[in-house]
């Protein structure tokens, strides 16, 4: 799978406003959302095609999650619930199984804590752990963060999974 970046416009909201980009990432791009030039950070992609940081804004902290739309899971559960009385509730077990399988085989997407740009299909190393609310907290509230965690050198590249 070839690598792709979905740039999230800093002026946009969380759900829309992405500009799709192929790799290699250019130095700047005209944003499909606001029409401005946004500077990008292609140097964050290393020679092996892995991410040292966000290719959009350059921030060194990223998190990995399954690229699996929650809405699909919800539809499966609703259909199973409707069918349950007619299938002696076997449909619920089947739905759980389908859900688990889809989740297991779903590809990963790597997101930036700061700009939420989405990185797909990049090399698996360095690996960025799953979402850590202590990192999110520090970035949001800075020194006022109650349970913020200081940034490790090099950001999240190759960091251990959060223990909570
Ligand atoms: Zn923009
Ligand atoms: Zn970013």
Image (cartoon, rainbow, N blue to C red):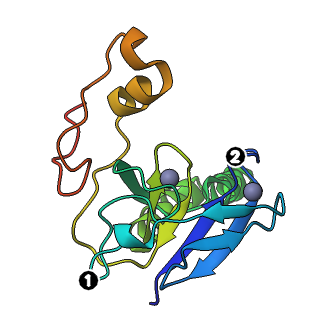
Residue 46 or 132: which is nearer the viewer? Answer: 46
Task: Tell me what residue is drawn at x 46 percent, y 89 percent.
Answer: 2
Above or below, 149 against 7 in this view is: above
Residue 34 or 49: which is nearer the viewer? Answer: 34
Kindly identify which numbered label has been placed on residue 47: 1
Q: Secondary structure at mark 2?
A: loop
Task: Tell me what residue is drawn at x 43 percent, y 59 percent.
Answer: 54
Residue 69 or 129: which is nearer the viewer? Answer: 129
Q: Quadrant of residue 38?
A: bottom right
Mark 1 surroundings: few (<14), some (14-19) or many (≥20) residues within 10 A = few
Q: Quadrant of residue 43?
A: bottom left
Task: Tell me what residue is drawn at x 28 percent, y 51 percent.
Answer: 129
Which image quadrant: the C terminus?
A: top left
Task: Tell me what residue is drawn at x 44 percent, y 73 percent.
Answer: 42
Distance between the Cα atoms at labels 2 and 1? 30 Å
Q: Is mark 1 within 8 Å of ligand 2?
A: no
Kindly identify which numbered label has been placed on residue 153: none
Tell me how many marks there are.
Answer: 2
The percent coordinates of residue 10 (x first, y second) are: 68, 48
Camera sees residue 21: yes
Kindly identify which numbered label has been placed on residue 14: 2
Camera sees residue 87: no
Mark 2 surroundings: few (<14), some (14-19) or many (≥20) residues within 10 A = few
Instruction: Tell me: 46 left or right of 105.
Output: left
């Amino acid at each position: 799978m070839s690598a792709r970046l979905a740039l999230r416009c800093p002026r946009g909201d969380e759900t829309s406003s992405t500009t799709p980009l192929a790799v290699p990432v250019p130095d700047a791009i005209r944003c499909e959302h606001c029409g401005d030039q946004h500077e990008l950070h292609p140097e964050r992609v290393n020679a092996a095609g892995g991410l040292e940081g966000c290719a959009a804004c350059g921030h060194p902290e990223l998190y990995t999650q399954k690229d699996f739309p929650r809405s699909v899971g919800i539809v499966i559960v609703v259909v199973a619930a409707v069918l349950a009385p007619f299938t002696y509730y076997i449909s619920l077990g089947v739905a759980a199984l389908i859900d688990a399988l889809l989740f297991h085989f779903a590809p990963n997407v790597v997101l930036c804590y700061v700009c939420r740009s989405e990185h797909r299909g990049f090399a698996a190393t360095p690996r960025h752990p799953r979402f850590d609310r202590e990192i999110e907290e520090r970035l949001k509230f800075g020194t006022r963060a109650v349970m913020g965690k200081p940034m490790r050198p090099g950001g999240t590249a190759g960091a251990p999974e959060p223990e909570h």
